[in-house]
Image: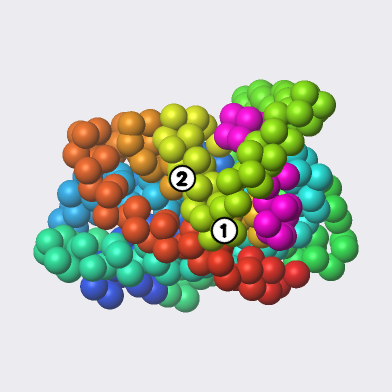
Amino acid sequence: TASGQRLVDVFNATCGRLPGGLAISSVFTCFVFGGLTGSATAEAAGVTGIMAKPMERAGYPRTYVASLIASAGTMANLVPPSIALLIYGIVAKVSIADLFVAGVLPGIVNAVLLVAFAVYVAHRNGYGRGAQIERMPIGRALYRSAWALLAPVWILGGIRMGIFTPTESAFFVTLYVFVIAKFVYRDITWRQVPAIMERAAVTSVAVMLIIAVAAVLSWLIETQGLAAAVLSFIRSIQASREAIILAMILILVVAGTVLEPPPMLLIIVPILLPVARDIGFDLVQFGVFVTVAINLGLISPPVGLTVFVAAKVAQAPLLETFRMSLWWLPSFFILLLLVAFVPSLSLALL
């Protein structure tokens, strides 16, 4: 998208001269772009489409590009308006506004960790030493992208100041993005509006169906005693809190390799919620914890959804892209442990 290209221009202008500069630009573009999409797969596809050819020309292999952006794209699940946090909030009956705020610091840490690993891998293998792409002057890049950069700020600021609810923020952001795309950037024409509205309607209906199924499944799991049975079993084995958290990580990561985020949230979370409450997990913190675990599953074989998407867009060999994605897995494990055992990382801004 044109807005995505403007974000890329900003980070290329500011980070492009650093070692691994284009990799750094990709990660931070994904962080900000997540505030416009809320979807990991949409972000992985969009940013890969913009960055794949410039990075390849600069000496980065397609597998590196696809795997890195697939990993960074999962940050859309952490930063507002995250669809994953929205669904979790409905399933767990937790404030969505609090979840949106709680995801910001872990999202920043996620970006910093990925940048550190990306620069290390690029330096170790000599990536990015080819011809550098032309960079726009910083002032011009900031001027061109200012409205797009402000979108996540408006979302979070408006919710925290009580100007609108998380639900109302969706309407505000939609209107805001439409106005700047049509009248400021002039990226769309009136003829394109019906098709855009059609795609938005299809996406909205899909999300509403997910929410409806979430309510039914949560009610079934609760009334049929499945969650209570799991809690009773865990209490019977008298495991330590740390052991239970590690077991939850294992369950979430393994399930995440074969399930997309919505089914994960619908099936696994209602079962684990009573366990989380029992061991003293703050439910807002637990929502961020679950989301990071889901993100880890999105880049893990055999069914790493964002890796499939990014590899297809970048025309990179799938198996080699999965192999390259192993470099980014430690950063997700580090973040997952930090979120699990350092509550302030998620709760400090509340």
Q: As shown in the figure, which amino acid type bears the numbered disc 2?
A: Leu
Work out whether 201 lies above or below 325: above
Q: Is residue 292 left or right of residue 203?
A: left
Q: Earlier in the sequence, mark 2 or mark 1?
A: 1
Disc 1 crowd, CA 10 A, few/some/many (<14, 14-19, 20+): few
- According to the picture, the residue beneath numbered tag 2 turns out to be 250
Asked whether 155 falls inside the magenta stretch, the response is: no
Q: Is residue 1 left or right of residue 202?
A: left
Q: Camera-side residue: 250 or 286?
A: 250
In this orientation, does residue 76 appear?
no
Question: Where does the image place residue 323, in percent across and percent down from the top left?
Answer: 22, 43
Q: Camera-side residue: 330 or 320?
A: 330
Q: Is residue 90 left or right of residue 127?
A: right
Magenta span covers which residues?
263-284
Disc 2 crowd, CA 10 A, few/some/many (<14, 14-19, 20+): few
Work out whether 228 lies above or below 13: above
The picture quadrant where one finds residue 221 is top right
Asked whether 265 falls inside the magenta stretch, the response is: yes
- According to the picture, the residue beneath numbered tag 1 turns out to be 240
